[in-house]
Image (cartoon, rainbow, N blue to C red):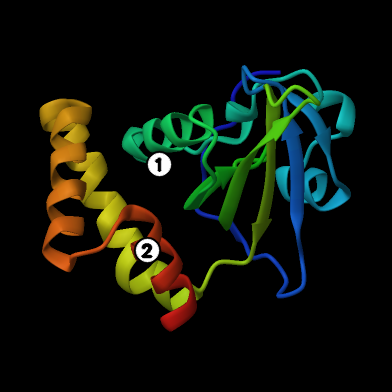
Amino acid sequence: MSAPVPNNREQVMHDNDFIVSKTDTKGKITYCNEIFMKMAKMEESQLLGKPHSIVRHPDMPKIVFKLLWNKIQQGEEIFAYVKNLAADGSYYWVFANVTPSYDNNNNIIGYYSVRIKPNPKALDEVIKPLYEKLRALETSGGMAASEAHLNQLLKEKGVSYDEFIVTIQTSY
């Protein structure tokens, strides 16, 4: 399957939708629910065993995924706004929570993600402009430039990344 070409068609999650997936420690999909398949416009056979990045939209700043991987590999959960790319080139935004899954010996054996409809006001007023800025910085100065900008923003607001993300989801 060749990579889809992004277009400007947006899909919007329903208020009560939950996208659920599980991956192994390398990010390969081991489970996906019906809503994930519907939004991604792919069959289960097209998703299972594939890297979760199969739905990564090129508009996403790389720093967001660096933060995500750093946190979950350390056994921490993370919340993030993510723009995903469907097989037909359409896109959809999610508010994601990703947590590690453990075996009986407390070893990380994979990751579990639940995504809900993001707060549209938070997307429009905070996330979209921020992600656009981060992507521009990554283009001109690499991921270090976008990371520095994000860290400065959090420092100015006096909050952690998690506090920032959860607050804008619930307060807008």
Q: Quadrant of the C terminus?
A: bottom left
Q: Nearer the viewer, mark 1 or mark 2?
A: 2
Asked whether disc 1 touches disc 2, contact meaning CB atoms under 8 Å apart, the reply is no
Residue 134 image label? none
Between disc 1 and disc 2, whose residue precedes?
A: 1
Q: Does any portion of residue 110 appear in the rendered image?
A: yes
Instruction: Check the image and report above or below for 66 versus 60.
Output: above
Q: Say few, some or many: other residues with alpha carbon within 10 Å of mark 1 (under 14 / 14 to 19 / 20 or more).
A: some
Pointer 1: what residue? Answer: 60
| Number of marks in picture | 2
Q: Does any portion of residue 92 appear in the rendered image?
A: no
| Residue drawn at the location 55% of the way across and 67% of the way down | 118
Residue 94, picture quadrant: bottom right
**x and y percentages locating residue 84 in the rendered image:** 56, 45
**x and y percentages locating residue 27 in the rendered image:** 63, 23
- Disc 1 is placed on an element classified as loop
Q: Give the CA separation, mark 1 to mark 2.
A: 20 Å
| Residue drawn at the location 85% of the way across and 45% of the way down | 33
Q: Amino acid at mark 1?
A: Met
| Residue drawn at the location 34% of the way across and 60% of the way down | 128
Q: Amino acid at mark 2?
A: Glu
Pointer 2: what residue? Answer: 163
Q: Give whichever of 6, 140 is nearer the camera.
A: 140
| Residue drawn at the location 20% of the way across and 57% of the way down | 154
Residue at the extreme bottom of the image, as rendered: 172
